[in-house]
Structure formats: C-alpha cells, structure tokens
Image: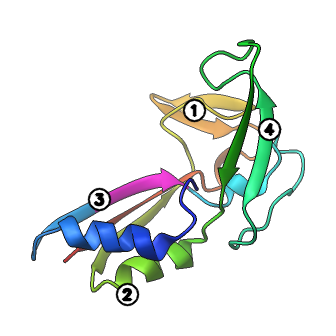
C-alpha cells in the first residue's frame, strides 16, 4: 500500500531475481484496507483509486507521542499485484489467502490460535493475509 506504481515495483523484483529464482511475497489482504480503522464501515475503494491521505495523532509505535503524522497509501487489488508480476515474465506458482494475521495489529482482534489473530466481528469469514510464490 506504500507504493503508487506496482509495475515499477515488479520491475525491481524481476531485475533482482535470477532465472529460476523464486520470489516469496506475503502481505495484508487488500480487503482489509477497504474498512475504517474500527471496521465499522467500508470507507475506501477496493480498486486503486486516488491516493488515500490520512493524518493521525501519535504513531503506530507510541499512540500518545504528541505528533501528527500524514500518511499516503494506495489500495492495490489482488489482480493488480499478480498482473504486475506476470507482465514481468514471473510465473505465479502458488497463491494462498488466510483468514488470520500473525500479528495483533488491527482494531478488535482476538487470538484464535498461536500467532493467529482475527477481527472478532468477522471471525473466520474474512481474508486478512495473502501470500504468493513466483518464479522467474
């Protein structure tokens, strides 16, 4: 979500992978970033639209840091991520989605197993992470 242009990202990935080399990628599912911070409403477009600009107080490390931070991000669909890699002649060998996060990092999460956290209101009905393996 921090990159505005996934084709340029895929150029870098493809450049540094040797023929026969593999690229392993795991990321939060783009459906997560559609919601407001408390997951009470759909606030953003699933598909890349304009940049999402948000100003928050504090930081992810220290909530009461007394600072205001502005962040800029983009929501990239699964199709956009995979297509950018495929255009660079990378073969996607494996693609998986997971209904849990290995981190307790979003509002309203509960631990459902060792290092497995879900958003309580959605339970196991919602994708939180995806991973892919691509080969050059």
Q: SS at mark 4? A: strand
Quadrant into which the N terminus falls: bottom right
Q: Nearer the viewer, mark 2 or mark 4?
A: 4
Q: Residue at x 61, y 31 (%)?
A: 105
Q: Secondary structure at mark 3?
A: strand
Most frequent secondary structure within the magenta stretch? strand
For marks 3 and 4, give the one nearer the viewer: 4
Label 2 and label 4: CA atoms lie apart by 35 Å
Name the residue beneath numbered marker 3. 24
Residue marked by disc 4: 55
Q: CA distance from mark 3 to mark 4?
A: 32 Å
Q: Nearer the viewer, residue 17 or 79?
A: 17
Gap between marks 3 and 2 measured at Cα:
17 Å
Please identify the quadrant where the C terminus is shown.
bottom left
Q: Tell us which disc is closer to us: 1 or 4.
A: 4
Badge 1 or badge 2: first in the primary sequence: 2
- Is 60 within the magenta? no
**Residue under numbered circle 1:** 112
Compared to residue 1, the image places residue 21 above or below, namely below
Q: Which residues are magenta?
A: 24-28
């Amino acid at each position: 979500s921090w990159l505005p242009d996934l084709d340029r990202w895929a150029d870098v990935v493809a450049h540094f992978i040797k023929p026969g080399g593999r690229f392993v990628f795991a990321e939060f599912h783009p459906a997560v970033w559609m919601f407001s911070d408390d997951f009470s409403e759909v606030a953003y477009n699933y598909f890349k639209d304009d940049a999402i600009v948000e100003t928050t107080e504090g930081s992810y490390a220290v909530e009461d840091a007394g600072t205001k931070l502005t962040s800029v991000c983009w929501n990239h669909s699964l199709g956009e991520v995979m297509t950018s890699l495929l255009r660079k002649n990378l073969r996607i060998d494996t693609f998986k989605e997971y209904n849990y996060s290995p981190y307790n990092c979003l509002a309203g999460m509960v631990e459902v197993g060792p290092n497995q956290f879900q958003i309580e209101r959605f339970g196991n009905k919602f994708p939180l992470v995806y991973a892919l393996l691509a080969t050059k």
